[in-house]
Amino acid sequence: MRFGGLIAAILFAAVAAVVVLRMSAGEQEVVTATTTIPAAQEVKSASIYVAAQPIPIGTTIRQEMVTQQPWPEHLLLDGFIRSDAGTNIIGMVARAAFQVQEPLLSTKLANPNDPNFIAGALPKGMRVLTLQMNEIEGVAGFVFPGDRVDVMLTHQISRIVAAPTAASDPDALPIEKEEPVTETLLTNAMVLAVDQRAASSNTTDQNGNLIIPRSVSLMVTPADAQRLRLGAQKGTLTLALRSLQDKDASD
């Protein structure tokens, strides 16, 4: 009996030891799992310009209209203007409307000092009118931005003349005859753009040939714009290139 009790005690002690060892291993696994969680990575950010207030289209950007805001670098889009890069946008013109906190895009801003920004260089009270041209009407491509031109109108007019038989037939009625005439509608107009080019670059094609303009944009007064548009409906408009020595002459 003594041996039987001793064996039972030994078996009970072994089972208890196994249980204790398993519980200790489980606690160690839990501790290990909790201590190996990686720390969150720091997100790099950049500073960009955003609208501090609603900015309507055509507005000149002032300091109080914009503010700086951090933005995640991996979310930066092409055109975002970074304030930490030293870019100055004060004085630029909004070519689209911006809402509050909306990032400012370089594609929606224009530099008024850029020669391609015609509206910024246009004097107050003047207008831009574009005329369709061909090789003859556009002076064979020799008109460039900054040149001065006269605009001539060729059209048909009706004239009352005596009937061919008036000498022999006193009762012959006069007849109406159509004949072409050319008159100058506008003198000394400045060319602002040729084929949407506000500068004299890319005036030749890939073969070196002079590009014939399909359109010419002129700086005119509102009254001259009306006159030219009516002339385009009545006949054919042709440009006459003026000499540089006549650019200040008044006809």
Image (tube, grey):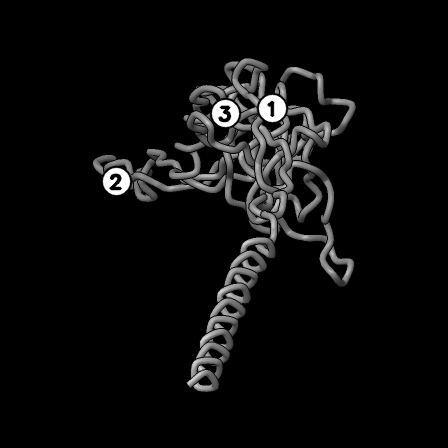
Query: Which of labels 1 and 3 is toward the front?
Result: 3
The spot of residue 7 in percent (x, y) is 48, 84
User: Which quadrant is the N terminus positioned in?
Assistant: bottom left
Q: Quadrant of residue 176?
A: top left
**Within-10-Å neighbours for mark 1: few <14, some 14–19, many 20+:** many
Quick one: label 1 or label 3, which is nearer the N terminus?
A: 3
Residue named by callout 3 = 51
Determine whether 249 is above or below 216 in the image.
Answer: above
Relative to the observer, which residue lies in front, 15 or 49? 15
The spot of residue 112 in percent (x, y) is 63, 24
Residue named by callout 2 = 169
**Residue at the farthest left position:** 171
Question: Mark 3: which secondary structure?
Answer: strand
Query: Which of labels 1 and 2 is toward the front?
Result: 1
The residues bearing labels 3 and 2 have C-alpha atoms spaced at a distance of 84 Å
**Residue at the farthest front position:** 1
Residue 224's tag is: none
* Kind of residue indicated by mark 3: Ala
The residues bearing labels 1 and 3 have C-alpha atoms spaced at a distance of 13 Å
Q: Residue at x 63, y 31 (%)?
A: 47
The spot of residue 146 in percent (x, y) is 69, 30
Quick one: label 3 or label 2, which is nearer the N terminus?
A: 3
Quick one: label 1 or label 2, which is nearer the N terminus?
A: 1
Residue 92's tag is: 1
* Kind of residue indicated by mark 2: Asp
Determine whether 251 is above or below 83 in the image.
Answer: above
Whether residue 237 is visible, yes or no, is yes
Relative to the observer, which residue lies in front, 230 or 131? 131
**Within-10-Å neighbours for mark 3: few <14, some 14–19, many 20+:** many
Question: Mark 2: which secondary structure?
Answer: loop
